C-alpha cells in the first residue's frame, strides 16, 4: 500500500510525487507514455524561472530524472477506475490494482465527448483496456480507437493474441451500433462489422473517475490546499483550470503533494 497515488505523469504529477518523497512518503505515479505528454511538443519555453530557452522535451527529461533520483515509482498505465474503501483508495490501472491513503489527480481535461452508442455498450463490447479484455476477443474482429504510439502497441498486442484488428487514429466521428452488444461501428460514415471496440483515450474525465467530484465548469474545483470536495482526493495542474502553464502546474503539484502527505499523516494516527 502506498501513501499517495498520483494520476498523471506530467509536470504537476511529478512535482507532487517529488514533494511526497521529500516528506518521507511512498508514492506511485500512473500515467501514459511520457513521449505523449503535450509538453514534449513545446519548441521553446521562456517563462519558466531559472531555466529559460529549454524545449518541452528537455524539461520533461529533467523532471523524470529528478523524480527517479528521489525514489518516485513511475508506471505506464491507463487508470480505469477508483473506489474509496474506508480510509484508503483502490485504483484500477490496466490489469492491476493499487491501494493508497490519498490520490492526487493531475493532467488535462478530456475535451472530446463520448461517441454515439459508446456509453450503452460499455461491458457489452466496448472496452477501455486491451490488455485487460483482449483475450475475450481472440479470433474475433475488433476495432481500436487510438490516440498515440502507445495505442498502436496495444493494437499490435491484440493482433499478437489472435484478434483481427482495424486500427483508427484519432477519428473525429465514430458511431457504435448493436442491439444487445457491439455488432458494428461506423467511422467517418464507413461501416465495419466488429465484435468489440477498444477506445484508448489518454485521459478519462475526472468526474467519471470520481463520480461525486465537484467541478467548476470543465475543471476540478479545489481550495488553496489543492483539496477537492472528496476526502483524500487532491488535484493539480491543467485539470484545475487556467492558465495552462508549466510553472502553475509545478507549483500546484508542490502544494498538492504537501497537503496529501499532511492528510496521510493524520490518517495513520487514527
Image: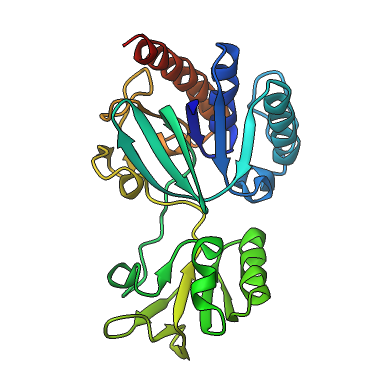
Q: Position of residue 234 (x, y in %)?
A: 38, 28
Residue 20, quarter of picture: top right
Residue at (57, 48) in percent of width and height: 77
Q: Position of residue 147 (x, y in %)?
A: 57, 63
Q: Which quadrant would the C terminus be assigned to in this image? A: top left
Q: Nearer the viewer, residue 58 or 101?
A: 101
Residue at (52, 85) in percent of width and height: 141
Q: Position of residue 41 (x, y in %)?
A: 68, 48
Number of numbered tags placed on the structure image: 0
Residue 170, quarter of picture: bottom right
Q: Is residue 178 left or right of residue 262?
A: left
Residue 40, quarter of picture: top right
Quick check: 165 above or below 114?
A: below
Q: Is residue 124 left or right of residue 19?
A: left
Q: Nearer the viewer, residue 160 or 111?
A: 160
Colouring used for the render? rainbow
Q: Is residue 33 left or right of residue 211?
A: right
Residue at (45, 77) in percent of width and height: 196
Amino acid at each position: 500500500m502506498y501513501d499517495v497515488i498520483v494520476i498523471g505523469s506530467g509536470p504537476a504529477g511529478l512535482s507532487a510525487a517529488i514533494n511526497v518523497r521529500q516528506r518521507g512518503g511512498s508514492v506511485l505515479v500512473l500515467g501514459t507514455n511520457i513521449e505523449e505528454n503535450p509538453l514534449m511538443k513545446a519548441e521553446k519555453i521562456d517563462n519558466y524561472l531559472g531555466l529559460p530557452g529549454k524545449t518541452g522535451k528537455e524539461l520533461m527529461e529533467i523532471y523524470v530524472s529528478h523524480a527517479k533520483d528521489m525514489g518516485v515509482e513511475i508506471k505506464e498505465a491507463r487508470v480505469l477506475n477508483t473506489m474509496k474503501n474506508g480510509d484508503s483508495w483502490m485504483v484500477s490501472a490496466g490489469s492491476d490494482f493499487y491501494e493508497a491513503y490519498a490520490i492526487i489527480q493531475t493532467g488535462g481535461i478530456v475535451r472530446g465527448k463520448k461517441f454515439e452508442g459508446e456509453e450503452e455498450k460499455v461491458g457489452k463490447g466496448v472496452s477501455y483496456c486491451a490488455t485487460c479484455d483482449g483475450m475475450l476477443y481472440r479470433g474475433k474482429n475488433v476495432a481500436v480507437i487510438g490516440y498515440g504510439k502507445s495505442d498502436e502497441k496495444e493494437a499490435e498486442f491484440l493482433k499478437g493474441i489472435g484478434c483481427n484488428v482495424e486500427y483508427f487514429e484519432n477519428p473525429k466521428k465514430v458511431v457504435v451500433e448493436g442491439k444487445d452488444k457491439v455488432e458494428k461501428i461506423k467511422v467517418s460514415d464507413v461501416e465495419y462489422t466488429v465484435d468489440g471496440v477498444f477506445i484508448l483515450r489518454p485521459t478519462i474525465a475526472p468526474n467519471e473517475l470520481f463520480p461525486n467530484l465537484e467541478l467548476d465548469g470543465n475543471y476540478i474545483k479545489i481550495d488553496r490546499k489543492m483539496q477537492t470536495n472528496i476526502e483524500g482526493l487532491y488535484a493539480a495542474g491543467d485539470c484545475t483550470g487556467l492558465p495552462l502553464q508549466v510553472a502553475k502546474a509545478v507549483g500546484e503539484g508542490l502544494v498538492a503533494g504537501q497537503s496529501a502527505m499532511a492528510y496521510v499523516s493524520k490518517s495513520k494516527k487514527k
